[in-house]
Image (cartoon, grey):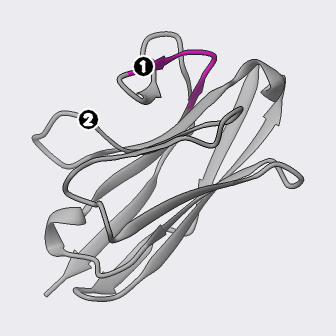
């Protein structure tokens, strides 16, 4: 089992920045693919950014490229998401996910470990 706990969400004005962090514990060596998903009210969950632990290869949604940066601190067992130049359309619940497998660059959702989420709200 793997436990994931997100932190760092909050409310910010457009153009501002937030840094999300996901603390991982448990059998983390089983999770080779980690990432962030988000879900806004009335919308489907979407992948935002992900990293392949072994290679460091990263994936980003087109909507966040150049603004968000994902990073992994292996010593601290954390997964961070630096979010800059935030826009109102970034408003959503953000979830950390981990799986042994990736699908299209993101942790395969089926069978993944999930955190409870952290809310990000961006206002004009």
Gap between marks 1 and 2 measured at Cα: 10 Å
Quarter of the N terminus within the rendering: top right
Q: What secondary structure prevails in the magenta region?
A: strand
Against 74, is 33 above or below?
A: above
Q: Tag 2's secondary structure? A: loop
Tag shown at residue 109: 1
Q: For the image shown, how many numbered marks are present on the structure?
A: 2
Quarter of the image holding residue 87? bottom left
Tag shown at residue 82: none
Between 57 and 31, the one lying in front of the other is 57
Residue 2 at x, y percent in the picture:
74, 26
Residue 13 at x, y percent in the picture:
26, 89
| The magenta segment | 98-103
Would residue 27 appear left or right of 64 to someone viewing this image? right
According to the image, label 2 marks what residue?
Answer: 45
**Residue occupying image coordinates x 27% and y 60%:** 64
Outermost residue on the right side: it is 75
């Amino acid at each position: 089992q793997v436990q994931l706990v997100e932190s760092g969400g909050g409310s910010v004005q457009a153009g501002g920045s937030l840094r999300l962090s996901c603390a991982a514990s448990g059998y983390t060596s089983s999770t080779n693919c980690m990432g962030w998903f988000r879900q806004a009210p009335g919308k489907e969950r979407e992948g935002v950014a992900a990293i392949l632990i072994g290679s460091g290869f990263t994936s980003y949604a087109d909507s966040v490229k150049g603004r968000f940066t994902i990073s992994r601190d292996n010593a601290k067992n954390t997964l961070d998401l630096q979010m800059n130049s935030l826009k109102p359309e970034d408003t959503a619940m953000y979830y950390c996910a981990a799986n042994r497998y990736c699908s299209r660059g993101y942790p395969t959702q089926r069978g993944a470990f999930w955190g409870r989420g952290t809310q990000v709200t961006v206002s004009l």
